[in-house]
Image: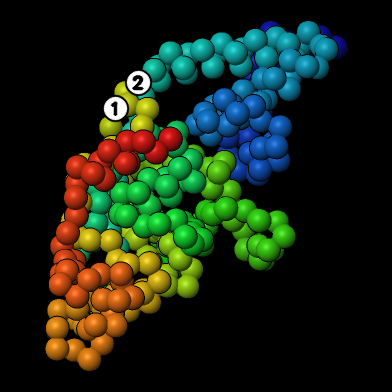
Amino acid sequence: MEPRPGENLLSFVSIFVVLSNHKGYEEDTKDTMDENVRKQPYHLRILTEVSNTLYKISTSSCKEISQFFIFLLKLQFNSNTDPMAFQFKIQLKNISKPTVWRRVVVPSEYTFEQFHEVIQVAFGWDMYHLFQFNSPGGRKDSVTIGLVDEEFDDWDEEKLDASETALSDIFEEEGQKFSYVYDLGDDWDHQITLEAIVDDTSATPTLLDGKGACPPEDCGGAPGYTRLKSILADPKHEEYASMKEWLGLPLDMHFNPNEFDLEDHQVMVSEVE
């Protein structure tokens, strides 16, 4: 029986609506996705992949539907030509006097692995340790993003691959919050707040502002850093000399927790690709 006029089109639209709401489709096809397709927004990736699949089926009906997919893709790209970027404020939690934070603008197509590098450079960390991103606690739909290691990862934990997950896959609206944890021993917890979604033609990140020195690596997390600052503020403290030695600072050099060279860090952040 020949399909009625428009029947193929209605079938196509139904397929697209269903797949657009089925996150498992992305997981099922990620290994076969072209790199350029993977960088597209989620619904466009579905559109492209389904279009390519239908076009390979040698029936006139499927090719008719595929041509309509391509038409929709062109419409979407033509209406989305302005590059988009995210402005984040990232602040170390449980650190005060002073607080330690950075404000950055990052292209929306950057992956979470690239975002990790931006945060490391903006703060002044040394990239010595593991990291992971987490959605706010207490949510049923909680998300963990990190580097995937099939040999050592906990199979009971669902984790998105930071090297394949784009910022635009997760961040959708201003005010959205996320967490970045660096060094899973010291647990340096950074709160990420999406302050603005902006039009930006730059292909690289920008550091806008910041405050506070980056804590030393391996000093024991937020409690250890608080203790370190207390010791270094008192030259008469019995651990003053040994703490200076551990940091590699001469006895006559003062540790300043407020020190942050914005211009130097801006140059380094702009070089993260």
Real-space CA distance between mark 1 and mark 2, rounded to the nearest whole angstrom: 6 Å
Residue 104 or residue 135, whichever sits in front: 104
Which three-letter amino acid code belongs to the residue tagged 2? Asp
As helix, strand or loop, the secondary structure at mark 2 comes to: loop
Relative vertical location of residue 8 with respect to residue 256 in this rendering, above or below: above
Are circles 1 and 2 on residues that touch, CB within 8 Å? yes
Q: Which residue is mark 1?
A: 199
**Looking at the image, can residue 97 be seen?**
no
| Quadrant housing the N terminus | top right
Question: Residue 257 in the image: x percent, y percent?
Answer: 18, 66
| Quadrant housing the C terminus | top left
Instruction: Answer with the quarter of the image where residue 214 lies.
Output: bottom left
Q: Residue furthest bottom?
A: 238
* Residue at image point 49% right, 62% down: 129
Name the side, left or right, on which 110 lies relative to 160: left
Q: Which mark is residue 82?
A: 2
Instruction: Answer with the quarter of the image where residue 64 lies.
Output: top right
Residue 208 or residue 263, whichever sits in front: 263
Name the side, left or right, on which 165 lies relative to 196: right
Residue 13 or residue 95, whichever sits in front: 95
